[in-house]
Image: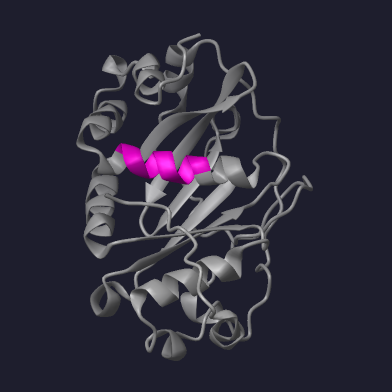
Amino acid sequence: MWRLSPRITRNITSSVSALFSHVTSSPYCGKQYLNTCCEHTNMRNLLDQAIPGDFLKWGSLGFCRTSRFATGFTPLQPKPLDSIIDIERAKKLSPDDLISIWDDYHIGRGNISASMKSKLYGLLEQRAAQCRYFVIPLWRGSGYTTMFSQVQMPHMIFTGLEDYKARGTQAAPYFTVSYYTEFTESKDLVLIRGDIVFTSKLSDSEAKWLLENTQSFYLNDNRYKLVERFNKETHEFEFKDVLQALEMPVL
């Protein structure tokens, strides 16, 4: 199945600087006011209000890391892969070496790196086209914060459900994910990069957990039934089923 790629230990340090040429640490990101992410007690009521009537307009936002809050934002397209790595050099690498360099490069830079096989990406893309939205609990201390996700391949975006309930399409993303498909045919590989937009809202480990588990709800047949129910049979959806799937206590 899919996986977050493990770091492969190899002596390829010199390759990293050559492959990741003309790279800046993060692109420009617009600013937007955010409320504090809250825990939720009445999930049914929140879900009924949170299901979007129109497609979210987050996909054009630029990606960056910041803990500042401000009003207003300026849309910006995400970074293309050729602004992150030297694609011509990457073409000469084996899939394992490319994954290793991709992971090594993103360590300590405030990004989440991952990869998946082309077939799994195709399944994720197919299912996301039918079911774009989902909710997933993020465990913190003795309770959980509920995150609201939109999957519009090749992007995945997360914000707090409470923020989306209050602001709708104006809610700012906490965490954005981009899927790069340039090597699907030549290497059977899709590179994945996650950017935490607001570090005060989400830690690196939480973002990694969100990416892993959200993908699992789209790629695992049993879990995907919950995604379908949320999108197509909302009033039949029970949030406790998500908690049970993740082996979290039902509060």
Q: Does the magenta stretch include residue 152?
A: no
In the rendering, at what x and y percent does residue 37 appear?
A: 65, 29
| 124 and 17: which is toward the camera | 17
- Above or below 82: residue 139: above
Which residue shows up at 50% across the image and 86% down it? 86
Which residue shows up at 60% across the image and 32% down it? 163
The answer to whether residue 246 is visible is: yes
| 246 and 75: which is toward the camera | 246
Q: In the image, which residues are magenta?
A: 209-217
The answer to whether residue 77 is visible is: no
- Above or below 165: residue 121: below
Q: Is residue 215 magenta?
A: yes
In the rendering, at what x and y percent does residue 122 appear?
A: 23, 58
Which residue shows up at 40% across the image and 40% down it? 214
Rendering quarter of residue 47: top left
- Above or below 239: residue 114: below
| 154 and 4: which is toward the camera | 4
> Which color scheme did the rendering employ for the protein?
one colour
In the rendering, at what x and y percent does residue 84 appear?
A: 55, 77
Q: How many labels does the image show?
A: 0
Which residue shows up at 37% across the image and 23% down it? 242
The prevailing secondary structure element of the residues shown in magenta is: helix
In the rendering, at what x and y percent does residue 184 appear?
A: 28, 72
- Above or below 138: residue 183: below
